[in-house]
Structures are given as C-alpha cells and as structure tokens.
Image (cartoon, helix red, strand yellow):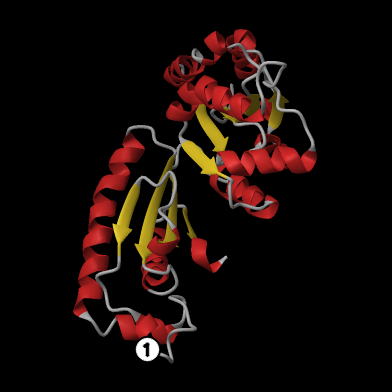
Amino acid sequence: MRQQQTRLIVVTGLSGSGKSIALNVLEDVGFNCIDNLPVSLFETFVAELDSHSSEAYQRTAIGIDARVPGAQLGKVPALVQQLREQGIECEIVFLEADNDILMQRFSETRRRHPLTDGNKDLEAAIALERELLAPLRDAAGLRVNTSHTNLHELRDIIRSRVADRASGQLSLMIKSFGFKHGMPRNADFIFDMRCLPNPHWHPELRPLTGRDQAVAEFLEQDQKVHQMFEQVSAFLSHWVPCFESEGRSYLTIAIGCTGGQHRSVYMAEKLKAHFEAQGRQTLCSHRELS
C-alpha cells in the first residue's frame, strides 16, 4: 500500500517566462518531470503513476504549454479538479511576464516563439498565447510573474514555495513593497502601512531598513504600529485557515509603504515571525531591498 499521497504539479505559462527552469528545479529535487504532455494522455498518465509501486512516482510534475490545441487546454482545470476528488494532490503553477519583457527575451535569445508563423508576428503570438492559456492561469494556485525575477530568484521561488511545501499544507508568502514603485502582482491581500510614522524623515534612520533594530524601536514607540500589527495578524490568523480548508495551496500577503524600505519591511518580518510561531511554513521577501 502507498505510504504517501501522490502529488502532481502542472507547470504551465507563457513561453519565455521560465517554465523549463521551473521543471528543472523540480527535477533536481526529486520530481519526475515530463514536458509538453498531450492533454489527451493526462488521465491515462495519472492513472499509471498513481498505481505505480515505486515511491519515485509519488512526486511528479508535467509541463503543459500553448503548443497543445486550445480545446484541450480548456479541459485541464476540470481534469485537475477531478484528480483532487480522487485523492491526488494536484496543483497548477502558472508562470508569466509582461509583454515587453517577453519580447526582449525572445529578441536576446533569437529563439522563435512557438505560435509565430507567416501571419503572426511575435507580439500577436504572445497575445494569442495569453488567450489560449487563460483557463490555466485563472485556475492556478500559484502565479509567478518573472518580469523582474532573475534566474536564481526564480529557482528559489520554485524550490521554497513549490518543491519544499509539505503535502496538504498552505504555503504563505509575505511580501513587502513600495507603492511608489507600483503595486505587486498576484497578491491575495494588500495592506497599506503608509498611515504609520515614517522613519524616512529621520536622517539617522533613512539609510536603514525595517530589519534594523533602530527602525523597529522607532516604530514601536507609536501605539498605532502595535494596533496595526494586532489587527492585521488577527485578521489573517482568522482567515488563512479558511483558505486552507478550501484546498488552497498558496497565499500571498503584500505589505506596502511608500518606498518599501522601512514600515512595510518591519511589518512583513513581524507577521512572518507571528505565523512561524503558529507552526506555519512562512516565507518573506522584500521587493525593494533586492
């Protein structure tokens, strides 16, 4: 009898956004990976791996992209849900990037986009690919925008959020950012810290970050900071288990301030410590500090 639940990860996304890198990372940590599996073979393949006696097949990742006929792509979310109902832990990870970044990447590598032909240039091919993959993007448990993510950062994201996630456990990401640099993509909740006292206006604190003790001591002098932490942590502590009970595998919490250096970093780190104390797998990243 199988000792562990079968885990299947569907890795998909726009060409040039890093799907092959994600599959390589999963393969490196012990997943059996198959790229460009026809959807028509999806169910047959899963039935085979689920009945296979080897533990090596308990963790499998398959890559699906827009080379699959559009009608078949639309069937994937229903198939994933069906597999979940059969007791197979199945999730979709979707990789994407902004159009200008994708066009730059294809230009630099001089690779041909798989959907270009005599009637479609690169820009039209990317637009068509977005349309074809929309059902998978909407059904994805984790969406990663790699526009401003380098190779090493993408590998870390896939390794920490996907490969190392314990079976059946929600992966919680808390991310700080600066509003003046734009809103974060694909966050499930966004909390605004701009109403809190700003260390930026104190010359001795300006070059520091929310990770520094001097900044923490400055912020903790104000009662509003304590109230904000207590109310945000209470809200999330109440609702995160509800998302988990509904089968969510990933949740991203974005914490913002003006520049993304002091208040948001401080609050993100405090929330990370709060959830780690509850025994939750919690990751923390600081967009403006990288």
Q: Which residue reaches farthest right?
A: 110
Please give the name of the residue rendered at 36% of the width and 45% of the height, measured from the top-left corner: 188
Between 184 and 223, the one lying in front of the other is: 184
Q: Exactly how many numbered labels are in the figure? A: 1
Between 93 and 122, the one lying in front of the other is: 122
Q: Mark 1 points at which residue?
A: 202
Q: Which residue reaches farthest bottom?
A: 204
Q: How crowded is mark 1: few (under 14 residues within 10 Å), some or many (20 or more)?
A: few
Snapshot quadrant of residue 113: top right
| Residue 259 place in picture, x, y as percent | 42, 69
Locate residue 173 relative to residue 2 in the image: left or right.
Answer: left
Q: Which amino acid does label 1 sit on?
A: His
Locate residue 13 relative to residue 239 in the image: left or right.
Answer: right
Label 1, secondary structure: give it.
loop
Locate residue 256 relative to residue 234 in the image: left or right.
Answer: right
| Residue 269 place in picture, x, y as percent | 42, 67
Locate residue 251 relative to residue 136 in the image: left or right.
Answer: left
From this view, report whether residue 115 is shown above or below residue 105: above
| Residue 102 place in picture, x, y as percent | 63, 39
Confirm whether residue 271 shows in the render.
no
